[in-house]
Amino acid sequence: MLETHSLTASYGQFKALFGIDITVAPGECVAIIGANGAGKTTLLRSISGVLRNAPGMVVHKGTPIGTLPADAVVQRGIAMVPEGRKLFPSLSVEENLLIGGQVRRGDARWTLETVYALFPILKERRLSPATALSGGQQQMVAIGRALMSNPELLLCDEISLGLAPVVIRDIYAALPRIRETGAAVVIVEQDITRALAVADRVYCLMEGRVTLTGPTASTTRDAVHAAYFGDAA
């Protein structure tokens, strides 16, 4: 479904990614792990069109999309749940969700009712200002807003950041139900145990380079430690 080819990315003179090659198959869950500053968020920003690249560095279903703007990437079926949620503070929960539906593609697998079925608390709070919700509930709104576009690929950037363990459990419990619709999921996560528990494959980044890749079922903690911290750790 998705491939990156020698993907590089920079912020001005600072180079953040150095030749990243990853693949995501239809319906699979891929975890991207690594320490702060490893390039995880930059990778998702590049895939989602927030950062532009050479056309062939990002390929979706055989089509180079590296130069497409973010709205065109969403219309192709790739939606992102950004770090920090980025909700619209002046809008209600339901209005934030409906904004995601404005770029709806394909059949309506995800509607207000199916999002509310996934996260029932949002139906109860649908008329509340989105930023009046708890952090976990706001994260549910951010995920629901992305789902409203009916994505084939959902990019999740640090969805557990700053949340209580019980809330993280509830959010991660929604991922299998999302995958049941046929969507693939890419999870950027610093919680290694959580990421490996839900993903089919893992990539570890360190200083903008891939240091480990493989199926999670055969990836050892020692290998993850070496890839995460470097051989000298």
Image (cartoon, helix red, strand yellow):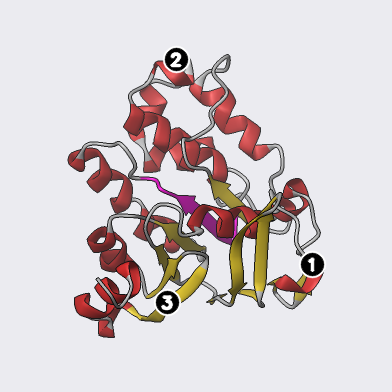
Above or below residue 133? Residue 20 is below
Spatial distance from mark 3 to mark 2, Cα to Cα?
44 Å
What is the three-letter code of the residue carrying label 3? Thr
Q: Earlier in the sequence, mark 3 or mark 2?
A: 2
Local crowd size for mark 1, using a 10 Å CA cut-off: few (<14), some (14–19), many (≥20): some
The reply to whether callout 3 and callout 2 are in contact (CB within 8 Å) is no
What is the three-letter code of the residue carrying label 1? Ala
* Viewer-nearest of discs 3 and 2: 3
Spatial distance from mark 2 to mark 1, Cα to Cα?
42 Å
Q: Earlier in the sequence, mark 2 or mark 1?
A: 1
What residue did someone put label 1 on? 54
Q: Position of residue 217 (x, y in %)?
A: 27, 81
Callout 3: SS: strand
Residue at left offset 63%, top offset 46%: 149
Spatial distance from mark 1 to mark 3, Cα to Cα?
23 Å
Residue at left offset 52%, top offset 18%: 92
What residue did someone put label 2 on? 128
What is the three-letter code of the residue carrying label 2? Ser
Q: Earlier in the sequence, mark 1 or mark 3?
A: 1
Callout 1: SS: loop
